[in-house]
Amino acid sequence: MELIKHECGVAMIRLLKSPEYYRKKYGSTFYGLNKLYLIMEKEHNRGQEGAGVGCVKLDAEPGNEYIFRERAQGPDAIREVFVNIGARIDEAAKDGVPAGSLPFEGEVYMGHLRYSTTGRSGLAYVHPFMRRNNWSARNLLLCGNFNMTNVDEIFKSITDTGQHPRLYADTFLLLEQLGHALDRENERLYSLHSGEGLTGLPLSKAIARDLNVANLLHRCSPIWDGGYVICGIVGNGDMWAMRDPNGIRPAFYYADDEVVVVASERPVIQTAFDLDTEQVHELEPGMAIIVDRDSSWRLERILLEGQNQRCSFERIYFSRGSDRDIYNERKKLGQLLVPSVLKAVDGNIDKSVFSFIPNTAEVAFFGLIEGLEDDLIQSKIHDIKRLSAIGALSDDKMREILKRRVRREKIAIKDIKLRTFIAEGSSRNDLAAHVYDVTYGSVKKGDYLVAIDDSIVRGTTLKESILRILDRLDPGKLVIVSSSPQVRYPDCYGIDMSRMDEFIAFKAAMALLKERGMGYVVDTVYAKCKAQESLPKEEVVNYVKEIYAPFSDEEISAKIAEMLRPDEVETPVEIVYQSVENLHKAIPGCPGDWYFTGNYPTPGGNRLVNKAFINYYEGKLSDR
């Protein structure tokens, strides 16, 4: 219902055979490029602000290009990138460039889909980033799904070596940091092999052959604080993808004797290569998958595995629901809401209509319906036993009991995307209210109308559109259900939720504090946050939790419902949120819940949530 900008998506493909092998078997030397396109399209949900592709060709003769990159901005960036790549290939072929030497006709591929989580935009910020050098083993392509919480520390570590970074952004800084480590690795091998008497091209080839990218990661990664999957290709053909030690951001891989593939989501690899679930493996936290230029590959531990903090919101909202495990988890989230939903409708299933708000909540809706049907079956058994015990179970009564159903309808339909930029004030709100349409006649007057969504973060669409259009059906009560708990805290690991005033739960807690004469709590939290500004991140405490501490989840939910119900809607509105306890029951393998609890998995998270509150209190926009 509400657009939350996702973390980015990554894709990497390493062909382990010669291009001629793929031409003979699959009909094209661009087999890897075609597969990359398919994976990127399947990951389109992860980034719609920009896209980029990088490619390295092995064993190119001096004087011939061997590193290629194409980037574009906008929601149609994937198509634009590959159209431009096709045009470059066609132009080169017309100019007489022979097959085997065409642009992007390589063995190592990298793809990236971008969502800005820092407010920075422009082609300069679209991955992959590139570092150029005349020595093949000093060239670097870099992309990732990450956000570092300690950019200041990384910046200082770079400047302490005497470098002068041009920009203060984590991707640029990582490129410089890893580039510096790559230089050191080259220098180590230069000293080693020149000492053996090698010079010129033989020396360059020996360095390219013996380069160990794991040394770069061991050197650079200990200072990184954040959630990340960082991918790189060196100009010599070495490739890696590394995951953060807490597993905050996701990564999966597949390998056989033809390819090694890495992507942010498992089902996209399955679809692209027609694989079973068990054939695609999760890249474990703190590990890197590395493919050397000789086509050998390995998994190597770079950092010790930390506490499991795999992101639960990834499973609720961001990832494709076609993943087997995610599908089952989302159904379980819906099922676990049954007791709360039944309470909201006073246990009266017969007078309740259930629906979902398109479209990402559909799987949770299935789980909710299955749970309600199980409850209804128990109710039917109870009624049959009761009537049978008193000799009153006639055929008509039996038929009446068995005909009871959980009523489900497709209520809300996202009809059109209206352009509201030319309207102001109430006119704009009126247009926004008509983005969705309703199925008239699907609800009887006085029915409870229950609609489930995957998350209620800001509540803007509910207030401006959904509640208004659902009210047209004249229900007796509107119950809006969120399959995720209340989102109370900003993310700092790559998702665009960085400001406290974005969260309706925070606004509700602040309103309750004001109503109850507890404004001193806000001032106290601000003072505590300010007092920590100069502390090392490891010593910072998340004092923003104290904003919510005086209130129960139910009190905040009730206040949210009050704040979101439009003035003209007289129908009672109740909002039901998933509990954190049930979240962990549904998704036991991904306990990262900082959005809901404020329990950040890295020290940098506590520092940034305090900074977000300070910015809110002082009336500033977040500067991350």
Image: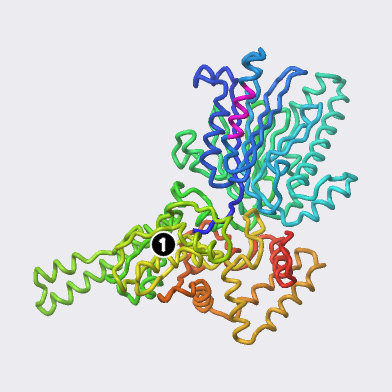
Mark 1 residue element: helix
Q: Camera-side residue: 93 or 156?
A: 93
Quadrant of the image occupied by residue 80: top right
Question: Which residue is identified by label 1?
Answer: 334
In the rendered image, the quadrant that contains the C terminus is bottom right
Q: Is residue 14 left or right of residue 558?
A: right
Q: Camera-side residue: 74 or 185?
A: 74
**The residue under label 1 is which amino acid type?**
Gly
Majority secondary structure in the magenta region: helix
Residue at image position (74%, 68%) is 540
Image height of 267 relative to 427, above or below: above
Q: Position of residue 534 (x, y in %)?
A: 82, 67
Residue at image position (45%, 64%) is 466
Query: Badge 1 local density, few (<14 within 10 Å), some, or many (20+)?
Result: many
Q: Is residue 59 left or right of residue 3?
A: right
Residue at image position (42%, 76%) is 570
Residue 584 in view, yes or no: no
Q: Position of residue 274 (x, y in %)?
A: 45, 34
Quadrant of the image occupied by residue 132: top right
* Magenta region, residue range: 80-89
Q: Position of residue 36 (x, y in %)?
A: 56, 33
Point out the residue furthest to the right here.
162
Residue at image position (44%, 48%) is 324
Q: Position of residue 203 (x, y in %)?
A: 82, 22
Q: Camera-side residue: 509 or 343?
A: 509
Q: Is residue 52 left or right of residue 431?
A: right
